[in-house]
Amino acid sequence: MRTCYFGFLFLMLGLVAASTIKADGWDRQSDNFQIRTFRGGPSAVKLLARCEQLRSDLQQVWLGGDDRHDWSPRCQVIVHASKASYQTAIGRGGAQTSGSSLVQSVEGEIVLRRIDLLYSEERGASALPHELTHVVLADRFDNGRPPRWLDEGIATMADPTEKRTLHQRDCHAALRSGDALPVVQLLHLDEFASAKQVPAFYGQSLSLVHFLGSQDEPIRLVEFAETAGHKGYDRALREIYQIDGVAELERRWRTYALRHGTQAPQALVSLVR
């Protein structure tokens, strides 16, 4: 989905030179992030460095040289020790999740960036790459809202292999059963009409992102979505990928997806470290 003391200044590989200790209610902060964790939880220093490195990696892969400015406001990252704390922060809609991101904008300007993470000893804060992907992509779209298929498909590319495998299985099952969403519907879907659409949507979005991402440099995916927003998907497909409209995309993508079966798509960038 989505603290105040004094101390020393830390330098972590040049990534957190601007970080401060227990300033303005946060355990650590840098040019782009504010971190709050809990006693016995992950190190705020290491998490801050991880966030800065992930942000740089994600921007390089999906945005290229664009949008490299420091974030203002900074992205708040809150790590929760318990399910109760996490759900209180994000609401009941995230009961089955371990990470949530929130980007709010006013008149086209982003005024809030926030990530909530549920921490466990087994998985740590494993949802961070997925949720930070949402925040990074928001910089390139009006009101911080990329098309939903693109937003979720790219974010899922940052998930561990086992999670991508589950989504791929859902995609394959939907194709085999006839429950797959037509690509034209997938591209425009913003709200789910039924719970049955959810697994197919996430599986298909991941598969479609991987298919298009393998046709050219990954950065072209964001260019494609931006072009589609102004000129429509048919024209954007012809200009960016030389695919003759959505109907042709549907034919090519289905062939690709069925050929890959239930095997998880390989990550286009290694983010899980």
Image (tube, rainbow, N blue to C red):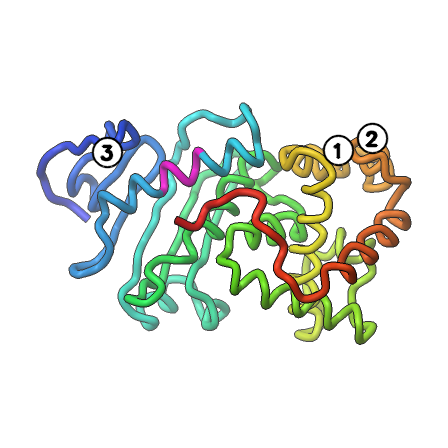
Q: Distance between the Cα atoms at labels 3 and 1? A: 39 Å
Residue occupying image coordinates x 68% and y 38%: 221
* Residue, disc 3: 12
Q: Label 2: how many residues lie within 10 Å, few (<14), some (14-19) or many (20+)?
A: some
Q: Nearer the viewer, residue 122 or 99?
A: 122
Above or below: residue 271 compared with residue 37: above
Q: Main secondary structure of the magenta part?
A: helix
Is 257 colored magenta in this rendering?
Answer: no
Q: Label 1: how many residues lie within 10 Å, few (<14), some (14-19) or many (20+)?
A: some
Residue occupying image coordinates x 20% and y 41%: 24
Residue occupying image coordinates x 36% and y 34%: 32
Q: Position of residue 125 (x, y in %)?
A: 35, 57
| Numbered mark located on residue 163 in the image | none
| Numbered mark located on residue 239 in the image | 2
Q: Distance between the Cα atoms at labels 2 and 1? A: 9 Å
Task: State which tag comes first along the sequence, 2 or 1.
Answer: 1
Q: Nearer the viewer, residue 180 or 77?
A: 180
What's the residue type where badge 1 is placed?
Thr
Span shown in magenta = 51-56
Q: Nearer the viewer, mark 2 or mark 3?
A: 3
Q: Position of residue 250 (x, y in %)?
A: 85, 53
* Residue, disc 1: 227
